[in-house]
Amino acid sequence: MDPDAPQALSPTSTDDTVSRAPVGLRAGLIGLACVLVLCGITPYNDNQIGATFIAGNHFPIGALLILLLLSLVAGPLWRKLRGSRPPSAAEMVAVWSMITVASGIPSSGLMRYLVPHIIAPRYYASPENGWERTVLPRLPKYLWVDDEASARWFFEGLPGGQALPWGHWLTPMLAWTVFTLGMYVTFVSLSVLVRRQWVEYERFTFPLVQLPVEMVAAPDPGRSLNALYRNRLLWIAVLLITVIRSLNGVHKFIPAVPEVPLNWPLNEMLRERPWSYAAWMNATIYPLVVGFSYLLSGEVCLSLWLFYLLYKLQCVLGGALGLNMPGVTAGYGSYLFAAHEEAGAAVALAFWCAYVARGHLRRVWESLAHGRSAQDAAEPLPYRLAALGFLAGLAIMLLWLVQVGVSPLVAILDLALALTVFLVLSWMVNQAGLLFLQPTFAGSEVLANLFGSRVFTVRSLLMLSLTEHVYFMDLREFLLPSLLNMHRIADDVRLNRRSMLLWAGLAIVASLGVSSWAAIRLPYYGGGGVTMTANAWTYIYAPQIPFRWCASLAALPHPASAKMALHFVGGGLGMLGLLVLRTRATWFAMHPIGFIIASGYPMGCLWFSIFLGWLGKVVITRYGGLSGYRALKPLFLGLVIGDCLNGAAWIVVGLFTRVGYPILPL
């Protein structure tokens, strides 16, 4: 028996008539203040110091730190003061949700890519790459900073006595904000439309909200701390992680201090052919990931690490057979064949999700046709408003793409692939608890290989690729899964969903403002983007990818690839086969989730930690049963809290010493 297997739930079980508490002014203002502070320091911490990302995934360290301070420090202190009202579970969850939803915006959720990408063309254009001829004329002037001095100062530092050229940024940032708002409206609306299906009908486990719920639980009468914080196993794990992280952090400053190894590069053993085709491969221990893996279902964990190893074996066999395996050029995967297989698998999974949700979608349609109904009375938004917002958001994005030079049909196809990725990755985060995800394929590259690049204009592919790299590729912090986690955790603390969504919207708006200011200002006053080698990916490598790819296509268009089309179709059929086996064959213990992300960077980072969490859970449940699993659960939750607490502590150290010690993947 899997202790985390979802249990049957009545479709109306979370929509009873008991009133829900709205988000109070105190909680809302605390949440907004935390959002402003964290978003203001995130670009400096992430890009100049190179410390652990304050967000960086769908369980941001910054949000957990604030929750720890509220539940472990502020709560007990408030309880000791007569006449004071300690923060309630609903208030603490509201603050955590606001930070979680907004904290990705200054980093990979938006600004990490938007700001460098819209100024990079001017700085990196050279006679050697020919961008002046192939790229710059195809970029609408209002979408990028076309000023040589502004670009040079951004990447090399602002000269003394010069003012930051804010005026050159105003028009491009406003132009991109139109697409941003359209996408965010789509996310909010889609989260409302799928909430009931995933929370109540399919009964997703939402592993990433389990720990916050336990952290904010009220203590027993006469106690200052709740049951989780009083458990010794939790603090044993926190102490163990603190010792390890302290030694490794001090080792950064004093190399003579011994370091506890947590990473073992396997490439040293894979130098000879055909093993070298496995490419980059590490075995790394992330205690936070080990802890979360203990909370996941056994079939999910097994699928994740096993499919990763099977993918590596596939690469080795392909190399041994002498097969041509080109790498991706516009996406984030390793090999082109794997990216197309996973693109096909994503499309198949999206159709499967829609098929499974057909009953809910029919009820939503009936609600739209007949006006307000009891079904959507407790939703974050009425279904009619959510449906209108979804269509309006899509229309804004579509019209924006057409306006900047993408042909309508190509824009529709690319947005369809983007929605597929958004839905599938949210499905993975909310059902399986994967806190760190990225798609392995770029929609523009898939379309160019399926239909041939000659079918599309270079300007269409350029604008698609640029838009994808800003919004659709590095989805480690994108908005939709956090919104769904927010809707789900509101049920556990009886929090009014509409009130929570309103405050989350205010947090998003506040984050957009302060994040834009911080992300633009940092390189000018931080010495220049190309000097911030703690995160060279942000300022040097990533901003050149779409332009290099499109310049190569302009110089040498390529025809449609039947081979890639077969991989695409094969990936879709493989995913459907896995889904059917999982639902029809009781003996089949593999979850299809591992197939769709096997070749990406996140699994390369996390597979070994997931394996350790899976192995620990298998051994404990095999010999200790359900009672053993529950008894040792605080130990694994302590790994999560300990890693987050130490990550936050070293973030603070890095802000003062300018030396980063990252404890999670960058």
Image (cartoon, rainbow, N blue to C red):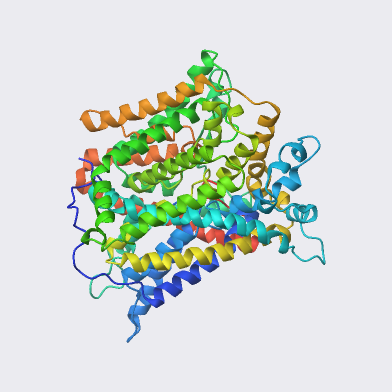
Percent x, y of residue 201:
23, 48
Percent x, y of residue 71:
37, 68
Q: Which of 570 and 134 is in front in this view?
A: 134
Q: Which of 115 and 5 is in front in this view?
A: 115
Q: Is residue 466 visible?
A: yes
Percent x, y of residue 478:
47, 51
Q: In this view, does 476 lie to the left or right of 205?
A: right
| Corner quadrant of residue 274 | top right
User: Vertically, is 597 above or below 13?
Assistant: above
| Corner quadrant of residue 423 | top left
* Quadrant of the image containing the N terminus: top left
User: Vertically, is 310 above or below 213?
Assistant: above
Q: Nearer the viewer, residue 191 or 235?
A: 191
Q: In this view, does 192 lie to the left or right of 479?
A: left
User: Vertically, is 126 above or below 397?
Assistant: above
Total tally of numbered discs in the picture:
0
Which residue sits at x=36%, y=47%? Answer: 433
Q: Can residue 234 be seen in this view?
A: no
